[in-house]
Amino acid sequence: MALPPARVSMPAEARQGEILEIKALIRHPMETGYRVDSRGQPIPRHIVRRFSVAYDGEEVFRMDLTQGVAANPFIAFSTVATRTGELVFTWEDDRGEVVTVRKSLTVTG
Amino acid sequence: MPTRRQIIVGAGLAGGMALLPRLGQATPQMRDEAAAALTKGAAIQDGRVTLTIPSVAENGLSVYTTVSVDSPMTAGDHVKAVHLLSEQNPIAHLLTWHLGPRAGVAKVSTNIRLGASQQVTALVEMSDGSFWRDSKTVIVTIAACIDGG
C-alpha cells in the first residue's frame, strides 16, 4: 500500500499552554522548472506554493514556498495548545492540487 | 516488471536530466534588493536571530535549515515573518514563514536547496515593525541544479 502523500507528527494530547512541536512532510517533486528532459524540452515547474495550518479555524502558521525548497518539503514549527479541537494542515501547489491532513488535539488542565 | 527497453529508456531520461539550461543566478545585490523590498527600506539590525545551517553541506539539494528568534512571542511582541534569502540561487527569496503569538516559540526548520556555496540570510520582521537578521556562509560540495532534483 502506498504511503499517504502527506504526514503530520504531533502529540494527540497536551496540557493547556504547552508548546507543541509539529512536523509536517509531503511527498512532492518540487520541480524547479530549470531542468530539461532528454529531448531538451524544459520540465515544467511544479512546486508547492503554500502550506498553512488552522487550529480551531484560526490560522496559526503559514509558509510561502518556492523552488528554493527541497523536494518532499519537511517543515518543523510549533503552536501553543489552547483548547481541545482540530488542526487542519493544507498544502497547495501551482497546479491547483490541494492536500489536507486533519489532526485532533485533546487539551487537558 | 519493467521490460529491458523500459529500463534503457529510463536510464536515458535520467541521464538527460543532468543537462541543464543556462541559469540566471541571484547576486548579493539581488539579495539586497529582495531584502529592501521586504523591509520597504527600513533599517535591518544584526542580532536576536539565530540561523542554524551546516557550514559544509555535502548535498545542496537538501540542506537542513533552522531559524530561531529571541522573542517572547506575546500578542504585543512577536515575530511576524521569517524570510530566507540567497545570494547565489536562481532566485533570491527562498521562502517565508508567517508566525504569530500562537506559535509560542519562534523556531522553524525546513530543507532548502542551495545552487552554490554562498551566504544564506534569515531576515526577520517583528510585530513592532523592526527587522533583524543573521547570515551564515555555507560551502556546498554538490550543488542543487546540477542533477537529480
Image: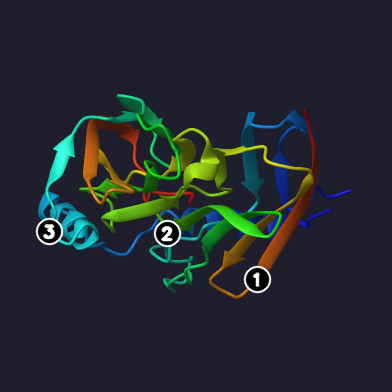
Hey, what amino acid is under mark 3?
Answer: Gly
* Residue A15 screen position, x and y as percent: 73, 28
Chain identifier of the residue bearing label 3 in the image: B
- Vertical side of A63 occupied by A19: above or below: above
Q: Residue at x 30, y 56 (%)?
A: B93
The dot on residue A66 is 2
Hey, what amino acid is under mark 1?
Answer: Glu
Whether tag 2 and tag 3 are in contact, CB under 8 A, the answer is no
Q: CA distance from mark 3 to mark 1?
A: 36 Å
Q: CA distance from mark 2 to mark 1?
A: 16 Å
Hey, what amino acid is under mark 2?
Answer: Thr
Q: Is residue B119 visible?
A: no
Drawn side of residue B39 relative to residue A94, left or right: left
- The residue that mark 1 highlights is A97
In this view, the residue in front, A98 or A88, is A88
* Residue B121 screen position, x and y as percent: 25, 41
Same subunit, labels 2 and 3: the answer reads no
- The residue that mark 3 highlights is B41
* Residue B55 screen position, x and y as percent: 30, 24
Quarter of the view holding residue A81: top right
> Tag 2's secondary structure?
loop
In this view, the residue in front, B139 or A12, is A12
* Residue A18 screen position, x and y as percent: 64, 28
Mark closer to the chain start, 2 or 1: 2
Q: CA distance from mark 2 to mark 3?
A: 23 Å
